[in-house]
Amino acid sequence: MAIDQSAVIGDLLVASSRLIRQSARATGSTVSSATWAALSVLQNEGPHRIGDLARAARITQPGMTKVVQNLVADEWVRRVADTDDSRAWLIVIADKGRAALADWHARLTEQMAGTFADLDESEWATLADAVRILASRSETTVTDGSQAVA
């Protein structure tokens, strides 16, 4: 029987989104997903102008302006002058932001541990293979073979 590749891709995307929402809800965090998205983009891609950051995080520019204001106030990001355009600012993730993002990833992982606790060694190997495959097809990098950084 042939595998319906489109259905598998669609199911994968839906399942991934559900797992992320489930783990995020379970943490009890009140920090918005837009905040985590912005920090992830900055950590993985480097400094961005607000408009570019908004597009990368898939929120409106006014929404990102508000997110960045809060992130600056929390000292999770900082604004630096854009050397290519003295009228513009770049948003850069700060050490506090990196620490908060690492903590967030750890909390998400912790919340999902019970969901996967009953997997056997073969299933863990399958998941590890899937992570490598997904990382090779996305902007995600696998840092040590066991933990993906989004």
Image (tube, rainbow, N blue to C red):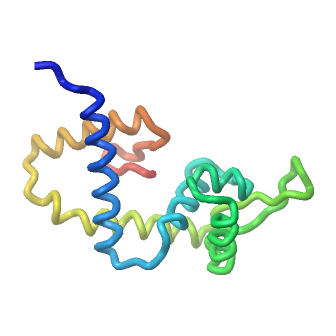
In the rendering, at what x and y percent does residue 40 appear?
Answer: 53, 57
Residue 43 horizontal side relative to residue 119, left or right: right
For image coordinates 48% across by 75% down, the residue present is 31
Q: In this figure, what is the number of numbered marks? A: 0
In the rendering, at what x and y percent does residue 122 appear?
Answer: 10, 40
Q: Residue 108 sits in which quadrant? A: bottom left
Q: Name the residue furthest right.
A: 86
Residue 85 horizontal side relative to residue 30, left or right: right
Image quarter (top left, top right, bottom left or bottom right) of the N terminus: top left
In this rendering, is residue 142 above or below 34?
above
Task: Give the camera-side residue of 35 and 132.
Answer: 35
In the rendering, at what x and y percent does residue 58 appear?
Answer: 56, 53
In the rendering, at what x and y percent does residue 2 appear?
Answer: 16, 19
For image coordinates 60% across by 50% down, the residue present is 56
Residue 59 horizontal side relative to residue 109, left or right: right
For image coordinates 56% across by 61% down, the residue present is 39
Q: Name the residue furthest top.
A: 1
For image coordinates 63% across by 59% down, the residue present is 60
Task: Give the camera-side residue of 60 and 32.
Answer: 60
